[in-house]
Image: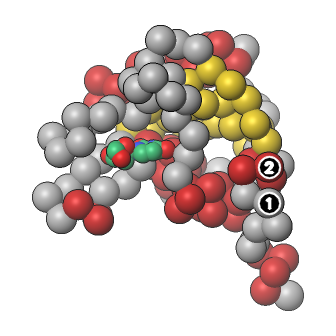
Amino acid sequence: MTDRELVQRAFEMHQYSYVPYSKFPVGAALLHKDGRVFTGCNVENAAYGSTICAERTALVKAVSEGCTQGWTAIAIAGTGADFCWPCGACRQMLYEFAPGLRVLAARGDGAFEEAALSDLLPRGFGPASLA
Ligand code: THU
């Protein structure tokens, strides 16, 4: 799976985004080294703070299917003019399972940029921090 294909999978998730409040659909696609892809979309709620982001939807789908290791990349696709980098809560959740993850952030015109999660969340707090 190429990076472009993973980004495309993220864009395809816009069709399922539940965004009556923000009207800002986001899709995510989490790639495992064995080729599996876990997709997600943002799901909003009338109690706004209960909203879950697309990345965390994909993460929870993977973990709930027993897949907690071997993640290599995540693509996140928004519709805006800026690249859709993950929010702080999503960075933290991803760091728990894949501190070395590659993050691909796409904007509405389809362009995307890459960053390492370790650069997006430097000196992060993870499982090893509890030792
Ligand atoms: N959102 C995501 O799904 N992922 C991000 O990385 C940024 C924000 C969602 C949450 C909310 O439904 C909407 O985008 C506007 O914040």
Label 2 sits on what residue type?
A: Asp
Q: Quadrant of residue 91?
A: bottom right
**The C terminus lies in quadrant:** bottom right
Badge 1 crowding class, 10 Å Cα cut-off, few under 14, some 14 to 19, many 20 or more, is few
> 38 or 21, which is in the foreground?
21
Q: Quadrant of residue 2?
A: top right
Mark yes or no: residue 82 visible: yes
Q: Quadrant of residue 30?
A: top right
Task: Identify which residue is drawn at 73% across, 58% down.
Answer: 121
Q: Judging from the image, what secondary structure is the residue with disc 2 in?
A: helix
Residue 68 to residue 73: above or below: below
Q: How is the image coloured?
A: secondary structure
The answer to the question of whether label 1 and label 2 lie on touching residues, with beta carbons closer than 8 A, is: yes
Asked if disc 2 is less than 8 Å from ligand 1, the answer is no
Q: Judging from the image, what secondary structure is the residue with disc 1 in?
A: loop
Which label belongs to residue 122?
1
Q: Which residue is mark 2?
A: 119
- Cα gap from disc 1 to disc 2, whole angstroms: 5 Å
Asked if disc 1 is less than 8 Å from ligand 1, the answer is no
Coordinates of residue 101 in the picture (x, y in percent): 76, 44
Instruction: Tell whether 62 sits left or right of 49.
Output: right
Residue 67 to residue 49: above or below: above
Task: Identify which residue is drawn at 64% across, 36% down.
Answer: 74
Q: Quadrant of ligand 1?
A: top left
Which label belongs to residue 79?
none
Mark yes or no: residue 69 visible: no
Badge 2 crowding class, 10 Å Cα cut-off, few under 14, some 14 to 19, many 20 or more, is few
Coordinates of residue 8 in the picture (x, y in percent): 53, 15
Residue 119 to residue 112: above or below: below
